[in-house]
Amino acid sequence: MIKQIELVEWQHLETQLKKATLEDYTHFVVINNSIKIHQNMIEAVNLKPCTIVSDYTVNQQYINDCRYFGKLEISFNDWVENINHYPNIIFHIETTQRILDEFNIQNLFDLALISLLQDDVVTDSHVIFDFSQSFTTSSKIWKDIHQLTPLNTTKFNLNKLAYEHKHGLPFKTKETLAPEQMRFTDKWLNATGFKMPHWLFNIVQRQSVKKHREKSYIYEKNPSKVKNHIVFLGFDYGFRGNSRYLFNHFAKHFSKLPIYFITDDVNGPNFIKPDDPKAKDLIESACVVILESNIPDTLKPNGTIIQLWHGTPIKKLFLDSNEPSQNLNIYNYRARKYNKWLQQDYFVCDSESIIEYFKSAFPQQQTHILNCGYPRIRYLLDKQTDHHYISFIKRELKLDPEKETLLYAPTWKSHQDDSDLLPISDGLLNKYNVIFKGHIEDQASYIPENAILAPPHIEVQDLLLVSDIVLTDYSSIIFDALTINKTVCQYTPNHAKYIAERGVYDEVMHSLATVRYSDAKALLNDLISHQMTEIHSNPFINKDNHAFETLSHIIKKCNKTYN
């Protein structure tokens, strides 16, 4: 457990730690008027028996550019590469007690610095802290730094931090070795032997910070720019998913409202191409913008933003996952994504049981969570008894009426491998109409022989309506299927690899344990012999869907404000 210690006098820390240990706490954080804690985030931290570096905001804004949250373990050198430096540490009590015995610790940053210089430091990507002022080390701690005999590159970075905090350099310049990759300010410091005047350093640093902020999706909404129209943005501008079904509902029931869908997929008076010169202004001046994923960096809406999202997650999302590929390789990935979420006013989910996961995965402190269900699932619930329509889709797909239908819909993976996919056997094809629906974001060339490839004009929801069995891996489509009482199964042969890459929500995964397979032969045998286990209840499905009613009320209310 993590103890939140509010320190008035620093010399009282040892006493507080002894008390925390007796109360079975293993870690602690320091809180005061300048350090606030995001409670949903700290509760989600995965504790390890060592120092933990977590993420943070400054005055509620994400202005960091660190990439180290893509790593499980880091060094002081990794930490110091950030554009700014704060004591963003969850302290290990036992390690801290040892440090307090060995070093002359005067303040919070002293403790953070020495903790970072220990051998074992891990990361947790949740945004735990919000700092409202800067912090510096004391002059005394630098006299103890020599005890650690750091490497020459580390000496350079320690000199850099000491310089920033306006202390004397702990190491001679000739003892240091500059890192291969340096910031512009670091190059100046290196070239001048850390003799660069602080006033000049501060000017250069402010310019760097200004440029970084401009690329971090930080802005304030301007209500004066807002007009009375409503804009829908699908996933990657596609006319599909939750945004499609909500738009269709509005077009049918509220035809007098000025609504637009930004997409290349459909033509018509209410559809605007993404590259249309007026698209950007329509989005930024809309009284309501409806999203299904992340908004493009170039767009900054000024009206109410409703995030529909795109499914109940099995795989870990954003701050719950290390996301090594994104964090290590995409510049400013976390800042842009985090700050976009801060702009959102409403977030839609499909069941009460999943809410806590979204609260730890995304910043929700400024967002109202609507547990009203997804529009796409409302469509399924309304359409499941429309036998005429279901028959029409079956004819479109040319399904054999003598066979049951199996829908195979694996999710997208950043590193797709053919071994992740179930081989479609002759026995399976003899038993079922096998429909294969690859993820729309997946660029893999896998096409199962003799399976029915779902045509692009038929939505996934319609494929669910005509299917008897739905097979996937980590896709949220499994909960869509369960909502309308379909038989489901999971095929996850490389589960350990996927957990290492992305991670899964254990409780969500466990709720599907009776239908999960890792062995292809066992799965094929049960499918062909029709021995599939049925799931009759699941905490992550919700049949009391009122998406259309709830969202219509909110959207109409916002629209009325600007009429």
Image (tube, grey):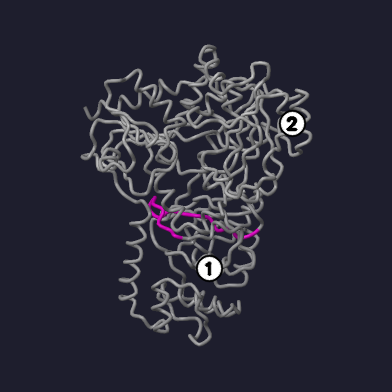
From which residue to which does the magenta span run?
50-65
Residue 222: x %, y % from top left: 25, 43
Q: Which residue is painted at 39% across and 73% down in the image?
A: 185
Q: Secondary structure at mark 1?
A: helix
Asked if residue 264 lies in the magenta stretch, the reply is no
Disc 1 residue crowd, few under 14, some 14–19, many 20+, Cα 10 Å:
many
Residue 246 picture quarter = top left
The type of residue carrying mark 1 is: Leu
Residue 62 lies, with reference to residue 293, above or below; the image says below
User: Looking at the rendered structure, which numbered label has been put on residue 426?
Assistant: 2
Q: Is the C terminus in the top left, top right, bottom left or bottom right quadrant?
A: top left
Residue 169 lies, with reference to residue 320, above or below; the image says below
The type of residue carrying mark 2 is: Asp
Between discs 2 and 1, the one toward the N terminus? 1
Q: CA distance from mark 2 to mark 1?
A: 63 Å
- Tell me whether the residue at label 2 lies in contact with that at label 1, contact meaning CB atoms closer than 8 angstroms: no
State the residue in front, 432 or 85: 432
Residue 172: x %, y % from top left: 49, 86
Residue 97 lies, with reference to residue 54, above or below; the image says below
Which residue is label 1 attached to?
Answer: 113
State the residue in front, 497 or 316: 497
Residue mark closest to the camera, 2 vs 1: 2
Residue 479 picture quarter = top right
User: Looking at the rendered structure, which numbered label has been put on residue 520?
Assistant: none
Disc 2 residue crowd, few under 14, some 14–19, many 20+, Cα 10 Å:
few
Q: Which residue is painted at 42% across and 72% down in the image?
A: 165
| Residue furthest bottom in the image | 174
Q: Which residue is painted at 32% across and 32% down in the image?
A: 271
Residue 212: x %, y % from top left: 37, 60
State the residue in front, 66 or 284: 284
